[in-house]
């Protein structure tokens, strides 16, 4: 079943059961605690906290998500995308636990010919919070699950709150056993790649008070109006229904991976490092497309920096796979064609998206051209001297003069088995900041600098064409 169909079946199923289909929100969110929407409930937060009355008792959506925390996982696990889509059904003081469990079970196991996903009931496992005997009893009664496939878990995995006083409550998650080829038996506690989590049901039931951490707060009592928030991973369901090995091989990303493999001449499946890089490319190219489509542009901080890192990682992965020509002009249009059916805006504004992405790749290529030899020479010197750590001064010089961001230095040094004196680097950076602050103070207080000697040099040699700043402003 294609991803687009999994999405429409979800919305149809919940629309038929009284849910209003609400369009997903753009990725950059006004929520001050987040850079990007990272779950389906984010746009509904004011309704879930009771700050704003919900305009509908029940809603369903497909929400684009970017989880920066998961970026490092991409390609290494079978199930984490930096971009993914979360399908959700929500109840605002309307139905509660029993219906939420019944809906998730029915849609997951209903035969494909009848509009469901046709998962095999015997392969589904669930987790519940250890305190939630009600959920355990419902899974037995509503779904007929044996106790052995209902796993109790603690606060870390199965308790939800927004991190501030307000609603909180237990969760219950659905997992699918993909079989012995994917790992050890024993349920989700034994192996979360074999037993893949695909749906999380959050039962917002209690009100919590002030406190820190996962459980360091008092429960003040039952909420006057209880809510349901669920999230089904669209790509995870596609992974299960398309019978592929991981998230990066589904219909919405596989053609990008395939194109990357063809361009680099690296056969997918022949070597684990190469496979991880190809998966990173397939994932990151799509994430960059979706972020650019929603108006994020590459930059040096916040959202822009996340996008910049994602684009650079895609480009660098292609280089490490042996492709040194511009890669994005080959890959981005493939991602566009895959995503345009569900998100027409990626086709509508593709010219702008492509301009921004290709310019970023060009700027990065020029940074790499300037800095790579310097870095390689410095690393070779460290090793020749029997050391294992690149001095902070070298990392600082690469940053200051060649616009080489520290994370790139760390990554490239690590590839050659060398660490970086990060503390030394940080110290030099703060000295530099302090100098800049002192200069600014001096300017503000009207102190003047004697420039006569500088003028003499300028007169003799003309202005300096100092290209490092170009690299710094576009790449650091
Ligand atoms: P995991 O334990 O596998 O990291 P999670 O518990 O962090 O997942 P939730 O926060 O419960 O995930 O999100 C709800 C659903 O969204 C998950 O059940 C899963 O189907 C999907 N999901 C979460 N993170 C990702 C991701 N990085 N890529 C793809 N799908 C995801
Ligand atoms: Mg997670
Ligand atoms: Mg989980
Ligand atoms: Mg979960």
Image: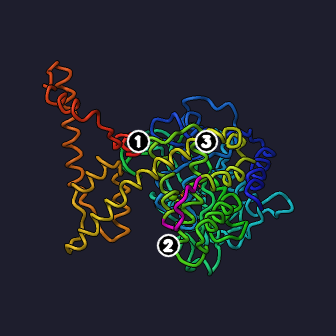
Magenta stretch, overall SS? loop
Q: What element carries label 2?
A: helix
Q: Nearer the viewer, residue 385 or 235?
A: 385
**Is residue 18 rendered to the left or right of residue 400?**
right
Q: Residue 273 carries which label?
A: 2
Residue 310 position, x and y percent, is 50, 52
Give the magenta range: 320-328
| Residue density around tag 1, few if under 14, some if 14–19, many if 20 or more, within 10 Å | some
Of badges 3 and 2, the one in the foreground is 3
**At x 32% / y 40%, what residue is drawn?**
466
Q: In this view, does 10 lie to the left or right of 215?
A: right
**Residue at the image position 48 percent from the left and 39 percent from the top:** 166
Residue 353, disc: 3
Residue 300 bears which disc, if any?
Answer: 1
Mark 3 is surrounded, within 10 Å at the Cα level, by few (under 14), some (14 to 19) or many (20 or more) other residues, namely many
- Specify which label sits upstream in the sequence, 2 or 1: 2
Could you say which is closer to the camera, residue 296 or residue 440?
440
Q: Quadrant of residue 271?
A: bottom right
User: Going from the N terminus, do you reach mark 3 or mark 2 first?
Assistant: 2
Is the residue at mark 3 in contact range of ligand 1, meaning its CB lies under 8 Å from it? no
Q: Where is residue 304 in the image (x, y as percent from the top left)?
A: 47, 41
Verify whether residue 441 appears in magenta: no
């Amino acid at each position: 079943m294609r991803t687009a169909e999994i999405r429409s079946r979800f919305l149809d199923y919940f629309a038929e059961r009284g849910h209003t289909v609400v369009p997903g929100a753009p990725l950059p969110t006004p929520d001050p605690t987040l850079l990007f929407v990272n779950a389906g409930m984010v746009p509904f937060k004011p309704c879930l906290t009771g700050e704003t009355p919900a305009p509908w008792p029940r809603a369903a959506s497909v929400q684009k998500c970017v989880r920066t925390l998961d970026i490092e996982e991409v390609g290494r696990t079978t199930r984490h995308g930096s971009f993914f889509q979360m399908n959700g059904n929500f109840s605002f003081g309307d139905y509660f636990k029993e219906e939420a469990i019944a809906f998730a079970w029915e849609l997951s196991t209903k035969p494909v010919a009848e509009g469901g996903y046709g998962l095999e009931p015997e392969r589904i496992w669930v987790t519940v919070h250890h305190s939630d005997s009600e959920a355990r009893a419902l899974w037995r009664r509503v779904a007929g699950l044996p106790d052995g496939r209902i796993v109790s878990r603690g606060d870390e995995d199965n308790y939800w709150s927004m991190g501030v006083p307000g609603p909180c409550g237990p969760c219950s998650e659905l997992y699918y056993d993909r079989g012995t080829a994917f790992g050890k038996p024993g349920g989700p506690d034994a192996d979360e790649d074999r037993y893949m989590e695909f749906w999380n049901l959050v039962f917002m039931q209690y009100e919590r008070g002030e406190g820190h951490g996962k459980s360091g707060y008092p429960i003040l009592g039952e909420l006057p109006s209880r809510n349901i928030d669920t999230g089904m991973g669209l790509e995870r369901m596609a992974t299960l229904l398309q019978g592929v090995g991981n998230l990066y091989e589904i219909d919405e990303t596989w053609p990008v991976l395939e194109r990357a493999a063809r361009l680099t001449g690296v056969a997918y499946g022949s070597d684990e490092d190469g496979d991880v890089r190809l998966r990173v490319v397939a994932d990151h190219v799509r994430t960059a497309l979706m972020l650019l489509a929603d108006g994020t542009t590459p930059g040096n901080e916040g959202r822009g920096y996340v996008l910049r890192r994602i684009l650079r990682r895609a480009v660098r992965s292609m280089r490490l796979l042996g492709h040194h020509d511009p890669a994005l002009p080959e890959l981005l249009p493939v991602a566009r064609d895959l995503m345009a059916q569900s998100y027409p805006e990626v086709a509508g504004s593709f010219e702008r998206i492509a301009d921004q992405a290709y310019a970023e790749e060009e700027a990065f290529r020029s940074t790499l051209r300037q800095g790579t030899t310097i870095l390689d020479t410095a690393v070779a010197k460290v090793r020749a001297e029997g050391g294992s750590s690149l001095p902070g001064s070298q990392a600082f010089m690469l940053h200051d003069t060649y616009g080489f961001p520290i994370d790139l230095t760390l990554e490239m040094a690590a590839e050659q088995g060398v660490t970086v004196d990060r503390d030394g680097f940080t110290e030099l950076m703060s000295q530099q900041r302090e100098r800049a602050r002192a200069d600014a103070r001096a300017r503000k207080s009207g102190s003047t600098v004697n420039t006569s000697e500088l003028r003499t040099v300028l007169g003799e040699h003309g202005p300096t064409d100092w290209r490092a700043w170009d690299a710094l402003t576009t790449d650091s």
